[in-house]
Image (cartoon, helix red, strand yellow):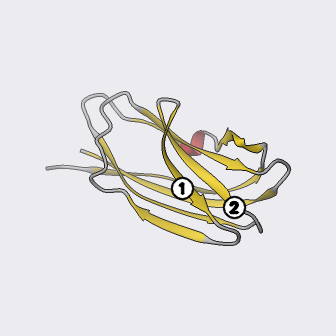
Amino acid sequence: MYSTPRFLQGIVPFEGKGMDRPIPLGATFSYVVPAGTVAQPLYFRGGNSTDELVCVILLRDGQPMRYFPIGARASMHVPLRVIEDLPADTHVELALAAPAGLAGTLVADLGIVEI
């Protein structure tokens, strides 16, 4: 079986709008499953430079799919294999929820495989 890895990754500065108001992380962290394929999320890794808890949210077609809370000046690694298939035309993206006015840097890496 042929597969193609895809990575949504980068280092981004942010300013929080409130834990109840997630902000999209931008086009670098957005992906649409190509026609004729199925995709599977493999892992999420993230790091938070601030002194407070932030939460990265994996959105599927605009709805929360998974939440990844990242502690103060902490990092996390979450294996996601075999959680679920993403059919063609599914849109996934990462958003960040952080306390209002909190400024910092987020490092994020979401691995996806197309099969």
For disc 2, the marked residue is 53
Q: x and y percent of residue 54 in the render? A: 68, 57
Q: Is residue 66 above or below residue 89?
A: below
Residue that protrudes farthest toward the front in the picture: 20
Residue at the image point whose x is 78% and y is 48% from the top:
16
Decide which of tag 2 and tag 1 comes sooner along the chain.
2
**Image quadrant for the C terminus?**
top left
Mark 1 neighbour class, 10 Å CA radius: few under 14, some 14 to 19, many 20 or more:
some
Q: x and y percent of residue 88 in the render? A: 31, 30
For disc 1, the marked residue is 68
Q: Is residue 25 above or below residue 102?
A: above
Mark 2 neighbour class, 10 Å CA radius: few under 14, some 14 to 19, many 20 or more:
some
For the image shown, how many numbered marks are present on the structure? 2
Q: x and y percent of residue 8 in the render? A: 50, 50
Residue that protrudes farthest toward the right in the picture: 101
Distance between mark 2 and mark 1 Cα atoms: 10 Å
For the residues bearing labels 2 and 1, Cβ distance under 8 angstroms: no
